[in-house]
Amino acid sequence: MVDSRTPGYDQVGTVWLPLPHWLMLPLVRIDGLWYNGLAGAIPAALAFILGGAFLYSAAYRILECESAALAAVALFALNPNILYLQAIPMTESLASACLLALLYFTVRFRDTQGWGSVIGAGIAACCGTLTRYEAWFLLPFLALYFLFAARRNRIAVVLVFSLLAALGPCFWFFHNWWLTLDPLAFYRGPYSARAIQGNAAYPGKQNWRDALLYYRTAAGLCAGPCLPLIAFAGAVAALFRRAFWPLLLLALPGVFYVVSLYGSGTPIFIPTLSPFSYYNSRYGLAVLPLLALCAAAIVSIVPRAARPIVALLVMLAAGVPWLVHPSPSNWVTWEESRVNSESRRAWTRQAAEYLAPRYLPGTGIFTGFGDLTGIYRTLHIPLRNTFTPDNGLPFDAAVQRPELYLREPWVVTMGGAAAQTAINRAARLGINYGLEKSVIVKDAPVIEIYRR
């Protein structure tokens, strides 16, 4: 968006919601923070802190117990899977912050009936819808909550909340239409989840039982073996405290993922169920705030003097599995990242090692985007020195008419990609690129490096 041959707004793309990218923009301008990854990690970490603050404040209002509120935050924040994801440029911590802000402002509205809570909830919902699609699923339930929770100005309250919350989806429809002439490109376009998955079968597709099984298992792996059991008992305590709305709100993201597994082309693969691999395991963390609040509710129903001790026992019980088996290999989100990036890290390193002594700074590279970008980040090559499909029509012109528009001295491509097509076409026109290096890694596409 800021370092490209064609920088600008359209680099937002059409599938990944834009708020996480916008929050990184001030930081990615600093090359050092881009190269070491902190440009993406800092916004995620700040969102994690903000989410913890909202969870404490909401739990304190719901359970009316400081020890229980502290336990809820600890059960959420000390989970190693969320700790890993809040340290990298992923959307989980920001999505959790928006969800927990919604929890806080809706509970606060129940108590105060104030417009500040309505506006705060509307802003939180809008931010959530610009972060993750499950926030869209929450909107009708939130509007109904305000309709029934408001004791005066009922219609005005619902309208104000709905108008603020709907800004996110409306903007995204317009954005997709502006870029592609299809307002639903994010859902049915060539880069959507449905297009990526295609008609391939996966566990849970059109099968409610398997969809529930896979999501429940993913959630259990993310939360650890003890917390779900504690939370199950704690749900009774939470219902005893009449926390009906908080439990419903925090359960809705999990419902969304079960529905997505069933019918929206969103598979989850986990190592304990067929096909015994890793994909989208992080979606199980969507119910971690629910489990944390339910488990903390146990603290609120014991005698006041015993609450600090019970809070400590609940935290220890939930954390024991992580302490007994502290290896990151037991954190499903970490292990998914490690397993699925092993071959990519290998070919990134080999390609970078080959180019490092040969690449002349400032010269152009005709290449792909996505995973190949790791090579240029490793070598500290500015992205404006690369020429990729994200540059749109100029890149397409170079592929179709290389004799007119292909000038780069280097080509780095995956076999069969558009850059490969361009140099094959160029060869037929007498423009020769010699193959200098083939990087072959098990379970990975071949990376080919050509020099003109």
Image: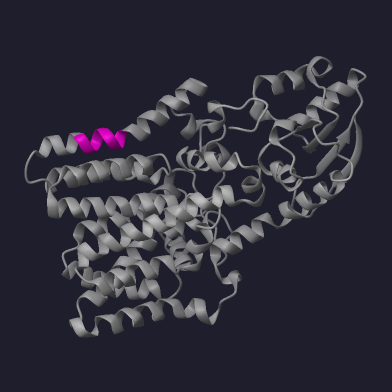
Q: Position of residue 185 (x, y in %)?
A: 49, 29
Residue in the picture at 19% in, 68% down: 64
Residue in the picture at 70% in, 31% down: 384
Q: Residue furthest left?
A: 152
34 or 286: nearer the eye? 34
Q: Position of residue 440 (x, y in %)?
A: 83, 50
As drawn, 256 above or below 390: below
Q: Is residue 273 visible?
A: no
Residue in the picture at 41% in, 39% down: 130
Q: Report the span colored magenta.
A: 160-166
Is 280 magenta? The answer is: no
Q: Quadrant of the N terminus?
A: top right
As drawn, 175 above or below 225: above
Residue in the picture at 43% in, 50% down: 94
Q: Quadrant of the C terminus?
A: top right
Magenta stretch, main secondary structure, is helix
Report the side of 231 relative to 341 (left or right). Answer: left
Q: Position of residue 429 (x, y in %)?
A: 89, 17
